[in-house]
Image: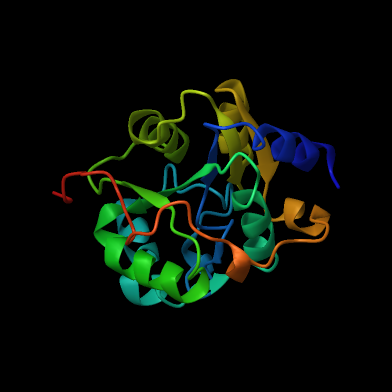
């Protein structure tokens, strides 16, 4: 087990912690739209032309995403931690992709019910800023917790904000004796939930 994963598991033994999880590149592989990502930093769309982001966020392409190998097992193990962490799924995807995203999650991660936080379409700030703000504003993460993401810049910011950072997909290989995600009982039995964000302009 990696040192970071060991720290994360210890942190999630305490009550009141949150488990923040990214979507693209962490739980989902953008197999049908990867060619639309920037080469300089494939984990972030910062600085990409709006027309290219529009093509990348095409709901028909988003629906074709595949789950990342090993993600379900690690997520299941972390959600089943003794402290019963609250799962926050935070993504820089536009909130206009709410329906296709929740349908995709229901197909590939059917037994986990995160609190889903998405970017307003009109919000053009860098993904790191958007995601930190969403978690601070809606996530109830005052006590910190664990942040699982594929973007090194996001993980650095999360560490500075008091989270234990786990780098996807590399951390998935460090999982020992994972709890199958089908055995995870959601903390709340409800439909997919999200903050009352205004619809895109």
x, y (%) of residue 90?
44, 46
51, above or below 120, in the image: below
Q: Nearer the viewer, residue 108 or 122?
A: 108
What's the colour scheme?
Answer: rainbow
Q: Residue at x 42, y 38 (%)?
A: 131
Q: Nearer the viewer, residue 122 or 85?
A: 85
> Relative to residue 99, is residue 198 drawn left or right?
left
x, y (%) of residue 56?
39, 64
x, y (%) of residue 28?
54, 64
Q: Residue at x 46, y 76 (%)?
A: 107
Q: Nearer the viewer, residue 38 or 44?
A: 44
> Relative to residue 142, is residue 19 drawn left or right?
right
Q: Nearer the viewer, residue 31 or 55?
A: 31
Q: Residue at x 47, y 35 (%)?
A: 128
Q: Residue at x 44, y 67 (%)?
A: 105
> Relative to residue 132, is residue 176 drawn left or right?
right
């Amino acid at each position: 087990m990696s040192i970071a994963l060991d720290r994360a598991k210890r942190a999630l033994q305490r009550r009141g912690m949150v488990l923040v999880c990214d979507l693209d590149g962490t739980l989902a592989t953008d197999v049908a739209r990867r060619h639309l990502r920037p080469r300089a930093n494939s984990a972030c769309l910062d600085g990409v032309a709006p027309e290219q982001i529009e093509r990348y966020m095409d709901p028909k392409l988003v629906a074709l995403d595949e789950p990342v190998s090993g993600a379900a097992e690690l997520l299941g193990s972390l959600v089943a931690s003794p402290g019963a962490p609250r799962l926050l799924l935070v993504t820089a995807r536009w909130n206009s992709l709410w329906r296709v995203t929740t349908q995709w999650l229901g197909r590939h991660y059917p037994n986990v019910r995160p609190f889903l936080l998405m970017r307003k379409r009109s919000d053009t700030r860098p993904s790191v800023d958007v995601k930190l703000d969403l978690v601070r504003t809606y996530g109830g993460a005052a006590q910190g917790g664990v942040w699982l993401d594929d973007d090194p810049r996001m993980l650095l910011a999360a560490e500075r904000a008091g989270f234990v950072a786990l780098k996807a997909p590399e951390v998935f290989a460090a999982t020992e004796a994972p709890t199958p995600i089908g055995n995870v009982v959601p903390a709340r039995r409800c439909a997919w939930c999200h903050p009352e964000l205004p619809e895109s302009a």
